[in-house]
Amino acid sequence: MPKLRVGVLFGGRSGEHEVSLLSAASVLKAIDRKKYEVVPIGITKEGRWVTAGDAERLLSNGDAGGVKKHLRAGDPGATPSAAVLAKGESVIVPPVPHTGKARGTAALMPFESEAKALDLHASAGGSQALHLDVIFPVLHGTFGEDGTIQGLLELAGIAYVGSGVLGSATGMDKDVMKRLFASAKLPITKHVTFLRSEWQKSARKTVAKIEAALKYPLFVKPANLGSSVGITKAHDRKELAPAIEEAARYDRRIVVEQGVGGRRGKARELEVAVLGNDDPEASVVGEIIPGKEFYDYEAKYLTEGSVPVIPAKLTKQQSKQVREMAVAAFRACDCAGLARVDFLMEPGKAGKIYLNEINTLPGFTSISMYPKLWEASGVAYPKLIDRLIALAMERRAEQDKNRYSR
């Protein structure tokens, strides 16, 4: 039986580019080469889809401004890119229409529905066409987790790991996500959403609107971004304006949430990994004890001190409640394949539990919470990769049952 050709897609234009490199290095290290023929595909921060040599430089952080020296999750350091990409197998995928050219490098050929794979043809003098059966996107944040790359793969008719366009887009948009959670009658924190243009037109009115609805401390977030990029905790009005300005750098919509626990203490941060398509399963519940005031980007990737606790110290009833809520959130956003669902619990043993957000392409290094939660649930990292690829193929087969014309 021929091996599946799996394209591992990493990098990207978002603020989570470096996190993607860490995830990709882990996947490329752990994936079973006896089962799969692996094709690494890199995307630079400028959005350029690159060949093997450049993809290797991406993984070794040659294009990441030395971030490798500071990121705590050091998988690339333990897994040299030269070993990962020893055969130099990669491909140029130009971000152009099917019949176009990209700087004379390559053209993306039309997809033939009977083939169920993506044909990528290099220009004269380049490598021969590669036939990809499934894409494993390890792209986090904007242009990778928000439905955009999923739309490209849908147009190509190729199987890919993770949620579709709708699930990816809703899972990325904190405002729309909360509307879906509320519709599903899931408990969420009080919040206010407004436009950057509203803030720029009248900061005073915007602050009044926020303070009329919410109590400090507040969490100020860009509506579309991940890995806690652009998120600030505002303890009072003096800190609110700078927090809004920071969030407004990343998106035209800003979400302000009332802090769970208020001034009584920090909320507990709980996480559950979900795996599946139409019949999803939830992992054990984990907890993150941040090394800082909350689990921001720096606490996640740049500094030591944050402590994962797996399983979280909860009662059986609390654990059951959180796991059921995680599956309900997964379904509410029409997710598929994988997601990590995050919760906030009020201080105290009997504190109320709120659904915070869902992440449709969570960090995937071997020490990230998503794989660690499944490892604690009995699914080892390499087997988890197998499951995700199988779910991608299953979802593609289900989609192929659809008719798109009369």
Image (cartoon, rainbow, N blue to C red):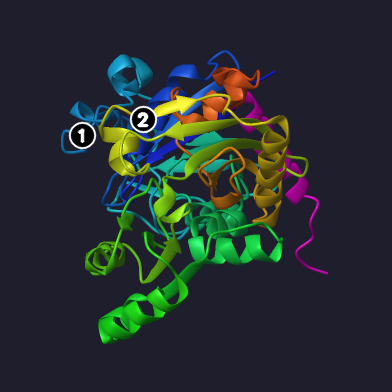
Of the pair 338 and 46, the residue shown nearer to us: 338
- Amino acid type at circle 2 is Ser
Q: Is the C terminus in the top left, top right, bottom left or bottom right quadrant? A: bottom right
As helix, strand or loop, the secondary structure at mark 1 comes to: helix
Residue 185 lies, in percent from the top left, at: 71, 61
The residue tagged 1 is 67
Looking at the rendering, which quadrant does residue 19 occupy?
top left
Density class for disc 1 (Cα within 10 Å; few <14, some 14-19, many ≥20) is: some
Density class for disc 2 (Cα within 10 Å; few <14, some 14-19, many ≥20) is: some
Instruction: From the image, give the main secondary structure of the stretch colored magenta.
Output: helix
Of the pair 386 and 314, the residue shown nearer to us: 314
Looking at the rendering, which quadrant does residue 118 occupy?
top right
Q: Is the N terminus in the top left, top right, bottom left or bottom right quadrant? A: top right
As helix, strand or loop, the secondary structure at mark 2 comes to: loop
Residue 381 lies, in percent from the top left, at: 55, 20
> On the rendered structure, is 401 left or right of 106?
right
Residue 193 lies, in percent from the top left, at: 45, 72
In the image, residue 390 lies in the stretch drawn in magenta:
yes
Magenta highlight range: 385-406
Q: Residue at x 65, y 20 (%)?
A: 2
- Amino acid type at circle 1 is Val
Does residue 300 appear in the picture of this structure? yes
Q: CA distance from mark 2 to mark 1?
A: 19 Å
The residue tagged 2 is 306
> On the rendered structure, is 403 left or right of 62?
right
Does residue 142 appear in the picture of this structure? no
Q: Is residue 69 above or below residue 241?
A: above
Q: Is residue 187 above or below residue 19?
A: below
First-in-chain label (2 vs 1): 1
Of the pair 164 and 371, the residue shown nearer to us: 371
Q: Residue at x 28, y 86 (%)?
A: 202
Q: Residue furthest right?
A: 406
